[in-house]
Amino acid sequence: MSKFKAYKKRLKEAARDPKISVALKRAIESYRKNVEEALKRFPHTLKLAEEVRAIKEQSIPRMEELVGQACEAIQKNKGKAFLARTPAEALEIIDGIVGTGKLIVKGKSLTGEEIDLREHLEGRGNEVYETDLGEYIIQLLGIKPMHLTAPSIHVPKEDVAHLLSRVTGKKVPPDIAIEVATVRGILRDKFIRADIGMSGANVVAADTGTLFQIENEGNIRLSTSAPPVYIALVGMEKVVPTIEDAFKVAEVTWRFAGYTVPSYVNLVSGPSKTGDIEKVITYGAHGPKEMYVIFLDAGRSRLAQDTVFREALFCLRCGGCFYECPLFAVTAGHFGDKYFGGIGAIWTAFVTGDLADAAPLTYSCLSCGRCKVRCPVEIDAPQMCLELRKRIAEGS
Ligand code: SF4
Ligand code: SF4
């Protein structure tokens, strides 16, 4: 079966799956309510979103320079920073740090998904645990995530109970509070024993080399601070000039992700240190002694040079557009592969390096424009999808 036919079959099956439509209906209702409340309580967010668009407009054409600055800042902070041009290069750098036979705790990372990081590390004999609750469920089920910020959006509590009963060997009831406590119990021990912690970042400040991570569960906080070694994998497009810019990007991101305020915003600039004994700076106090940051290109610099598609790099990964997309509402993450929806079509085309890989996505976009209206940085994904169809047809 051709790729296109297989994709169409998956879409149709997903559209007929009542679990997906019920779960998405609930998620969409609650997302809209949450964003409305968040914007009502913090109305300055809309103005801030305009500023963020301007920050991205200035940052993306300077991406190479800003990543260079961020690397320098991280090195000054006694971390180590790298720029990987391809997924293979990134994996090679990570392999050099990790080795084999390690216990790894990992925060949710779309860039990690992009390069199949977990599968790669497991293939080299490491034990890897996704620590985001939704991502952990996805890992146990052996399926792909269905949303950027809510990967197990389509899995009901009954299925989670069944899964956790299998993992623990004890009967876990379909009670969400008990399910959450069960996962906490399983993962607590992994955080403490882990050799390495890994995560991505929502935004990075070039001037200070600070990584921002927005979260609610506290798993990123633990993954980035409990193990002795910390590795971050970050897309090049995440770097903005200053820490002040980064705060603005972070606030707009979490608000359009549906949070009035997230439980945690982690700022990580370097390894853990102390000067408390005789003022001698010593690394590895309570947090990691070693910190590594790998910036990933993988098509991003080519995208940054393309004036038609460049604005896809403005994406904050807030996930807001998916809750407005009529196709996503009935098919969830089946409208995409690693990247979803209209914006995902552009990302797929550039990160895979083959425009044709994005054909199924771009041809299934309905051009309704609803995603652009929701997008905090007004990314015109529908128009870009039409342009992409043109390029695919022209074979350029
Ligand atoms: S334009 Fe395409 S991607 Fe955007 S909301 Fe409509 S169908 Fe979804
Ligand atoms: S395209 Fe816009 S709404 Fe969608 S995830 Fe990116 S920033 Fe958010």
Image: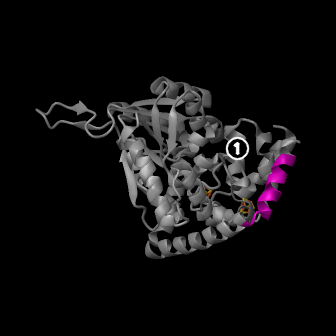
Badge 1 marks a residue whose secondary structure is: helix
Q: Looking at the image, which residue sits at the far left?
A: 278
**Viewed as shown, does residue 378 lie left or right of 41?**
right
Name the kind of residue labelled 1 in the image: Thr
The x, y position of residue 86, in whole percent, is 61, 30
Q: Is residue 338 magenta?
A: no
Depth check, front residue: 78 or 385: 78
| Vertical position of residue 3 compared to residue 98: above or below | below
Give me the residue at 50% from left, 58% from top.
253
Residue stretch rendered in magenta on the structure: 5-18
Q: Is residue 217 above or below residue 28?
A: above
Question: Is residue 378 toward the left or the right of residue 256 in the image?
Answer: right
The N terminus is located in which quarter?
top right
Q: Is residue 166 visible in this depiction of the protein?
A: yes
Q: Nearest the camera: 28 or 124?
A: 124
* Residue denoted by label 1: 348
Q: Which SS type dominates the magenta stretch?
A: helix
Q: Quadrant of ligand 2?
A: bottom right
* Horizontal arrangement in the rendering, residue 332 relative to residue 220 (left or right): right
Front in this rendered view, residue 218 or 184: 184
Q: Can residue 47 be seen in this snapshot?
A: no
**Residue 130 in the image, given as x and y percentages of width and height:** 51, 45
Residue occupying image coordinates x 41% and y 37%: 194
Rendered image quadrant of residue 292:
top left
Q: Is residue 14 magenta?
A: yes
- Residue 41: x and y, percent? 44, 75
